Amino acid sequence: MKVYEALHWASSFLKEKNRDENAGELLLQHFMRMNRSSFLACLRDELDTNIFEDFKKAVLLHAEGRPIQYIIGYEEFYGRSFLVNEDVLIPRPETEELVHGALQRMDRLFGGKKTPEIADIGTGSGAIAITLKLEKTDLQVTATDIYEPTLALAAENAKVLGADIQFVQGDLLKPLISSGKKFDAVISNPPYIPVSDKEWMSEVVLEHEPHRALFAGTDGLDIYKRLIRSLPEVLKNEALVGFEVGAGQSQAVAELLVQTFPQADIEIVYDINGKDRIVFATIRC
């Protein structure tokens, strides 16, 4: 079988199963260990039988609903490959915008300061914490998560990518409060999906990605409320807060921040798709 024939089979099969037919190309590139340009140049080459068998198994898994990222074991984020498994949420492009915006604001707020101390709450794969550290090496970054296997994967990503991060297990800000440490910035992409949204969500997400990283009560705001109540205990007098939010939640999250920090400068940032996706608060006490 030639490469293009295997690709045609996968695309047709996935389309029949109401999956993204382009997934076949991503999977075949992975098993052939090629970038896209090399892959396209060899479409008429003979495909190794062992590679086809591995590819076929992966296509069948994806047809059943398993996300491509969990099949191949990684996802790209901010130009780097992060290991992922079903203990962590798959990093999304929208979160890259949170990281980019946080870096810009840190430069403005802490431009002349040595080693700003940053906390990433609910780190998951470690994508936010690790990217912040690698993009701005003078940061001291602490990352928390409640689930030990999640932290283990995040620590593995930090090791592979060469990021010096302190990982702490615990529920949201509790381990930071216990330590008595204060931070220049707190960044988080917490669970924010209302439980009722389960009714219409894709089974690719619902049956595979960890629910503790997805859902947050009836209105999706439970985690923001808990985080914001505790923020005064961990923030320095001048600090940055950055949250990713669900579309339509920005105003509610902004109001929660203002209730706790009446003098804060609040910014609502829209993502590349025009959805309100990020809320930043600059706090000066």
Image (cartoon, rainbow, N blue to C red):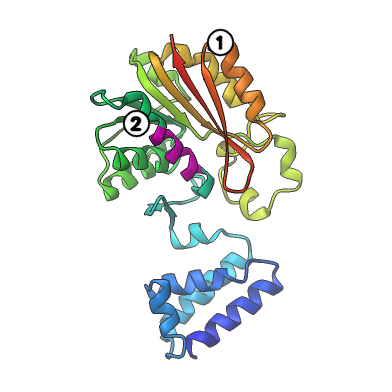
Residue 107 numbered mark, or none: 2
Secondary structure beneath disc 2?
Answer: helix
Rendered residue at 25%/26% (across/down): 115
Q: Amino acid at mark 2?
A: Asp
Of labels 1 and 2, the one closer to you? 2
Q: Nearer the viewer, residue 255 or 55?
A: 255
Q: From which residue to which does the magenta span run?
A: 95-104
Rendered residue at 52%/69% (across/down): 58
Image x and y of residue 160, in percent: 28, 50
Image x and y of residue 113, in percent: 26, 23
Rendered residue at 38%/78% (across/down): 38
Secondary structure beneath disc 1?
Answer: loop
Earlier residue among tags 1 and 2:
2
**Badge 1: few (under 14), some or many (20 or more) residues near its Cα, within 10 Å?**
few
Q: Quadrant of the C terminus?
A: top left
Q: Is residue 133 magenta?
A: no
Image x and y of residue 186, in percent: 43, 25
Residue 23 numbered mark, or none: none
